[in-house]
Image (spheres, rainbow, N blue to C red):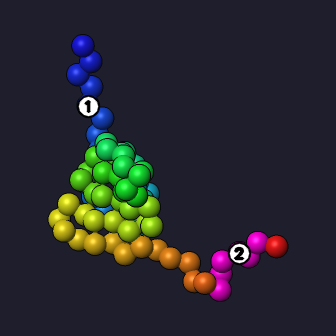
Amino acid sequence: MCVHRSSCPAAGSPAVGSPAPAPRDVAAHVVAAHPEQGWNLLCDGTIVFDDTGELRPDGGVVAPRRVAAGRLAMAA
């Protein structure tokens, strides 16, 4: 039987070589996927939403990162 446990970074931890923490800058993996509801639970306890918003295990909120309407590409 395999007793290997993959490590999971702490919520909000920066990736190796990164100067500062960024919301998706780490390799936390999905442990529960709910695409029909638009969210995933990561191994560090963070809930990540399809609109790029996040809820951290400590109750912190990361607002969705949205593109300004003027920067969206228009279909021809």
Q: Are marks 2 and 1 in contact (CB under 8 Å)?
A: no
Q: In this view, does 33 lie to the left or right of 65?
A: left
Asked which quadrant contains residue 47, the reply is bottom left
Q: Name the residue under label 1.
A: 5
Provide residue 32's location: percent of width, then percent of height.
Answer: 31, 44
Q: How far apart are marks 2 and 1 (CA)?
A: 43 Å
Provide residue 45's location: percent of width, then percent of height.
Answer: 24, 53
Instruction: Residue at the far bottom: name it.
Output: 70
Quarter of the picture containing the N terminus is top left
Q: Relative to 54, does residue 44 appear above or below in the rendering?
A: above
Asked which quadrant contains residue 14, the reply is bottom left
Instruction: Please name which of the two marks, 2 or 1, marks the residue nearer to the observer.
Output: 2
* Residue type, mark 1 in image: Arg
Instruction: Give the residues in magenta.
Output: 70-75
Q: In this view, does 20 lie to the left or right of 8?
A: right
Task: Residue 67: say if magenta.
Answer: no
**16 or 5, nearer to the observer:** 5
The numbered mark at residue 73 is 2
Q: In this view, does 2 lie to the left or right of 40?
A: left
Provide residue 66's location: percent of width, then percent of height.
Answer: 50, 76
Residue at image coords 28%, 72%: 61
Asked which quadrant contains residue 13, the reply is bottom left
Element on which disc 2 rests? loop
* Residue type, mark 2 in image: Ala
* Marker count (numbered): 2
Q: Relative to 24, does residue 71 appear above or below in the rendering?
A: below
